[in-house]
Image (cartoon, rainbow, N blue to C red):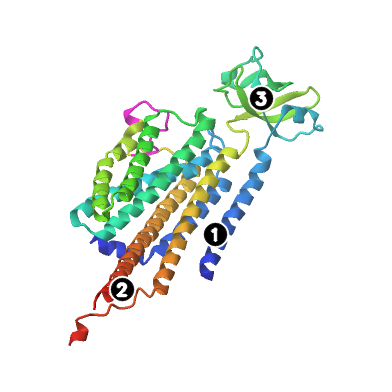
Amino acid sequence: MTGFYARWAIMVGGIILLALMTFQQYQHDLSTISLATLLNSPATSETVRIQGMVKSGTLSGAVDQGQATFELIDGSTTLPVEYAGPPLENIRELKTMVLIGQLDSATKTFKAKDTALINNFGFVAAAYLLTVISMCWALFAMSQRVMVLFKEIKEEKLYEPEIDPLANKE
Amino acid sequence: MVNRFIRYIQRYKGWFGGAAAICIFLGLYTGLLASPPDYYQGELVRIMYVHVPLAHTSTLAYSVLFFGSIWYLWKRDPLVDNMCQASAGICALFTALALITGSIWAKPTWNTWWTWDPRLVSFSVLLLILGGYLMLRKLVDDPERGGRYAAILAIVGGIDLPIIKFSVEWWRTLHQPMSFSTRGIAISDDILVPLTLMSIGAWLLFAYMVMVRTQILYLTDLLQAKKGRLLSQTHFSQTSP
């Protein structure tokens, strides 16, 4: 019984450790901040991720060659963006985009160098957590059921040999 | 023959469980921390390391159910029937998880949780067949008759396996084409390593789960049989003069 729970404690501990390591690695890289937070934060050259909608009538430049300028809207905040990076295949006006880059504090322009499909690690975390938790739950329930069945069989003494009724007649 | 094989591998199920845990742990580590993001999909590619192994394993699980059902109808071996029932339950779990993780991947990529795509529909049909199989076993009072009907359903439902496999080639589809085919492997090494580790881990995990579940069904049958015998003995001693 102790061995059973010890084995499970080790397994769950390993999974939690891995989850914490992953969280630590991606927390910084995959956190998206709002445009207002970016504009109000002190000047920094740190690479950040922002999300907003491409303002209608502002998109210009050679989009398929990875050069574009446009304005990004997030609520009431608007931020001019200069994009220089991989060719933009899916950009259009009024489309919500996640951009990776740095804010030029002098010109208050966002220098984007890449785009992303997701603004945080939520989708990936959801897929992993759902799978790991479901599998662990199924395995734990099955292992426990085996243990209960063995205990029940042992306690009920169901393994006692059958008495042969013919043997007494001899 | 199959009976002896099941009994033989039952002895080593702990090894399967241990090997599955190691493979999955290494796969999770390489998939989440050591592998780079994909050029097009970015970080979302990491969902593939759980979605693809789950989907592969569910088709493998259904294959076990399919061939096990044929064998059961031929030999009427109760242990093979237990193994089929175990495979069906675990296959349903893997299939449901594959559909859900696929849906989570589809939302940011295709901008929808669900679309009437041939691969998605044929895979959902697999889940419905499995649901029908498990319900049939519960609904029919006579377990032997229920097992027989369920085996027939599993064999008929086997037609869905090639449809799932080739749906991406037969019809116009949003889903990715086959990555492993006679034309070669269309995956880069960075992605192939965690994907292979997770796939092997999922197959071993399935084998382990089937063995444990088969054992549960066997022990439950044994307990019921023994209890029935004890009850009949009690009844006999009370009613006999």
Q: Which residues are magenta?
A: B169-181
Label annotation for residue A52: 3
> Mark 1 packing: few (<14 Cα in 10 Å), some, or many (20+)?
some
Q: What chain is tagged by disc 2?
A: B
Task: Describe the element under mark 2 as helix, strand or loop.
Answer: helix
What amino acid is at disc 2? Thr
Is residue A64 found left or right of B213 in the rendered image?
A: right
Q: Quick one: label 3 or label 1, which is nearer the N terminus?
A: 1
Crowdedness near tag 2: few (<14), some (14–19) or many (≥20) residues, C-alpha within 10 Å: few
Q: CA distance from mark 1 to mark 2?
A: 45 Å
- Numbered disc total: 3
Whether callout 2 and callout 3 share a subunit is answered no
Give the quarter of the image for residue A55: top right
> What residue is shown with label 2?
B234
Residue found 38% across the figure and 58% down from its top: B213
The image position of residue B145, as x and y in percent, is: 23, 52
Which chain is indicated by disc 1?
A
Residue B4, placed above or below residue A78? below
* Mark 1 or 2, closer to the camera: 2
Q: CA distance from mark 2 to mark 3?
A: 76 Å
Q: Secondary structure at mark 1?
A: helix
A57 vs B114, nearest the viewer:
B114
Q: Quadrant of residue A49?
A: top right
- Which residue is rendered at x = 42% and y = 47% of the image? B93
- Quadrant for the C terminus of chain B, please: bottom left
Q: Is residue B170 magenta?
A: yes
Quadrant in the picture for the N terminus of chain B? bottom left
